Image (tube, rainbow, N blue to C red):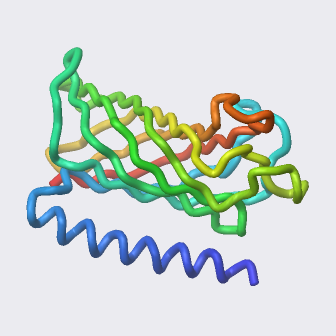
């Protein structure tokens, strides 16, 4: 039964990739990113109970509309992280600020909203109690762009309701991603 969420996640990932590839051909998608993240990493921003899922699959599209700001570029980002063992999965939309050095090193910060399929109350001790269905999504990324198309990065994402509810365990993920810019 543990394979069912993984297979569903992979099917969703393939569908999202096909849709994003079509949108990229039309110039709407600036870059696609795929990654493997450690799910619910302890001792980062979130604490409390830990979900036992080992891995989440992350997929994201950075869209083409952009604004220059403080030497970098702000773009919309749409994505999701799928917990492979039945833990909390999320879908998000952000404003992402990225600054790139001529050497190929880049750094990104974002702020946005996420929805999740986990629990809001402390019902199941194997899952996070996130307090609200809608959460803040705060990503950070640092990486290296090899050429005009390919990059690799370390990616961190934090999900929280920012104490707008009495319950706010938060959820952190950390991992690596590959990016392809069109």
Is residue 121 placed above or below 74 in the rendered structure? below
Residue depicted at 71% across the width and 68% down the height: 85
Residue 160 appears in which quarter of the rendering?
Answer: top right
Give the quadrant of the N terminus: bottom right
Quadrant where the C terminus lies?
A: bottom left
Residue farthest along the top direction in this orientation: 70
Occupied quadrant, residue 70: top left
Relative image position of residue 76 (x, y in whole percent)? 29, 43
Which of 41 and 105 lies nearest the eye of the viewer? Answer: 41
Position above or below: 148 against 88: above
**Which residue is at a point 19% across and 50% down the rendered structure image?**
30
Q: What is the tally of numbered marks visible in this picture?
A: 0
- Residue 172, percent across and down? 64, 41
Residue 47 locus on image (x, y percent): 78, 34
At 56% from the left edge and 56% from the top edge, which residue is drawn? 90
Q: Is residue 114 left or right of residue 67?
A: right
């Amino acid at each position: 039964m543990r394979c069912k969420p993984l297979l569903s996640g992979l099917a969703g990932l393939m569908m999202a990739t096909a849709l994003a590839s079509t949108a990229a051909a039309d110039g709407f998608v600036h870059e696609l990113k795929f990654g493997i993240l450690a799910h619910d990493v302890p001792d980062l921003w979130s604490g409390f109970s830990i979900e036992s899922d080992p891995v989440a699959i992350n997929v994201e599209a950075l869209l083409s509309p952009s604004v220059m700001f403080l030497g970098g570029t702000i773009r919309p980002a749409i994505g999701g992280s799928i917990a492979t063992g039945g833990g909390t999965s999320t879908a998000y939309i952000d404003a992402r600020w990225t600054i790139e050095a001529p050497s190929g090193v880049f750094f990104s910060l974002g702020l946005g909203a996420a929805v999740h399929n986990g629990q809001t109350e402390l019902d199941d001790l194997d899952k996070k109690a996130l307090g609200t269905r809608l959460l803040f999504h705060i990503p950070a990324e640092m990486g290296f762009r090899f050429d005009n198309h390919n990059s690799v990065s370390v990616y961190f994402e934090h999900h929280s309701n920012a104490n707008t509810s009495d319950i706010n365990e938060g959820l952190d993920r950390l991992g690596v991603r590959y990016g392809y810019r069109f």
